Image (tube, rainbow, N blue to C red):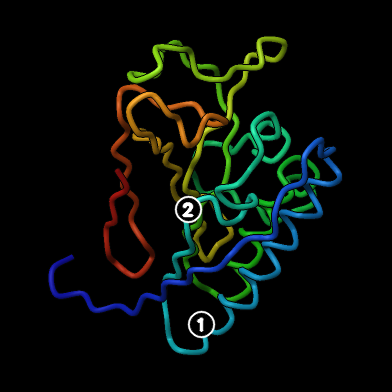
């Protein structure tokens, strides 16, 4: 609410990069290496008294250079935000990166916001510039979104946001591996320290 004071940390790092033709095991290793870096920097943020730490776009999955075609291997089907802790063996096997991030948030009693890929239902909208459909794996009916996940100190997913204005210039798509949510999402979440944040 008004007058609430809090301390935030912002960390901008380069990710461990995705390889081409990656398997799910390859992707898991890369994502968990990025999670280990998040752990290290979250510890520093917590020691400095931060209540929330924010990492960059695409950071946790493997950065903005994720190869086209690898997005569904690196993205994870994030659950809907709620009160359930994702820091458990049940979630580790299904969404290893999100579970690791949830455990880090719980370990340091802090809120973590970071870029990562989210798998969700295919979208029907088309790129306003290329006039082509966004990627979709028709066999499983899923597409990958360039997303932000927010993990709370209880290990739960507080919010998730799908980017709606992908980087492009005229007819060049700089993020052709991701789908674009439509209509644009406006997502808010209440942090445990009494502040409401928005992502749009």
| Residue 31 picture location, percent across and down | 71, 54
Q: Is 178 in front, or is 20? A: 20
- Where's the C terminus, which quadrant? top left
Q: Is 130 in front, or is 77? A: 130
Give the answer, above or below, for where 28 lies relative to 120: below
Residue found at the very far bottom of the displayed protein: 48
Residue drawn where x is 38% and y is 24% of the image? 171
Question: Which residue is disc 1 drawn over?
Answer: 46
Does residue 9 appear left or right of residue 1 in this picture?
A: right
Residue found at the very far left of the displayed protein: 2
| Residue 99 picture location, percent across and down | 68, 53
Does residue 97 appear left or right of residue 50 in this picture?
A: right
| Residue 32 picture location, percent across and down | 74, 58
Q: Is 68 in front, or is 87? A: 68
Q: Is 179 in front, or is 101? A: 179
- Where's the N terminus, which quadrant? bottom left
Give the answer, above or below, for where 47 lies relative to 170: below
Residue drawn where x is 67% and y is 63% of the image? 35
Question: Which residue is disc 2 drawn over?
Answer: 57
How many other residues sit within 10 Å of disc 2, few (<14), some (14-19) or many (≥20)? many
| Residue 139 picture location, percent across and down | 72, 10
Determine whether the residue tagged by mark 1 lies in a helix, strand or loop: helix
Callout count:
2
Dividing the picture into quadrants, the one containing residue 54 is bottom left
Q: How far, Cα to Cα, is label 2 from label 1?
A: 21 Å
Give the answer, above or below, for where 104 lies relative to 41: above
Residue drawn where x is 63% and y is 14% of the image? 141
Label of residue 191 in the image: none
Dividing the picture into quadrants, the one containing residue 192 is bottom left
Mark 2 vs mark 1: in front: 2
Determine whether the residue tagged by mark 2 lies in a helix, strand or loop: loop
Residue drawn where x is 64% and y is 49% of the image? 61
């Amino acid at each position: 609410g008004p007058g609430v004071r809090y301390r935030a940390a912002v960390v901008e790092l380069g990710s461990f990069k995705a390889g081409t033709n990656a398997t799910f095991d390859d992707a898991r290793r890369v994502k968990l290496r990025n999670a280990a870096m998040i752990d290290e920097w979250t510890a520093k943020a917590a020691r400095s008294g931060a209540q929330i730490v924010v990492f960059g776009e695409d950071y946790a999955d493997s950065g903005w250079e994720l190869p086209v075609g690898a997005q569904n291997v690196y993205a994870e089907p994030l659950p809907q935000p709620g009160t359930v802790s994702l820091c458990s063996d049940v979630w580790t096997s299904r969404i290893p990166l999100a579970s690791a991030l949830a455990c880090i948030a719980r370990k340091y009693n802090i809120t973590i916001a970071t870029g990562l890929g989210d798998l969700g239902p295919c979208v029907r909208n088309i790129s306003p510039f290329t006039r082509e459909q966004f990627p979709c794996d028709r066999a499983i009916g899923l597409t990958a979104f360039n997303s932000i996940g927010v993990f709370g100190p209880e290990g739960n997913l507080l919010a998730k946001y799908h980017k709606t204005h992908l980087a492009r210039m005229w007819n060049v798509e700089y993020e052709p591996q991701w789908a674009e949510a439509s209509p644009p999402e406006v997502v808010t979440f209440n942090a445990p320290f009494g502040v409401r944040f928005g992502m749009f």
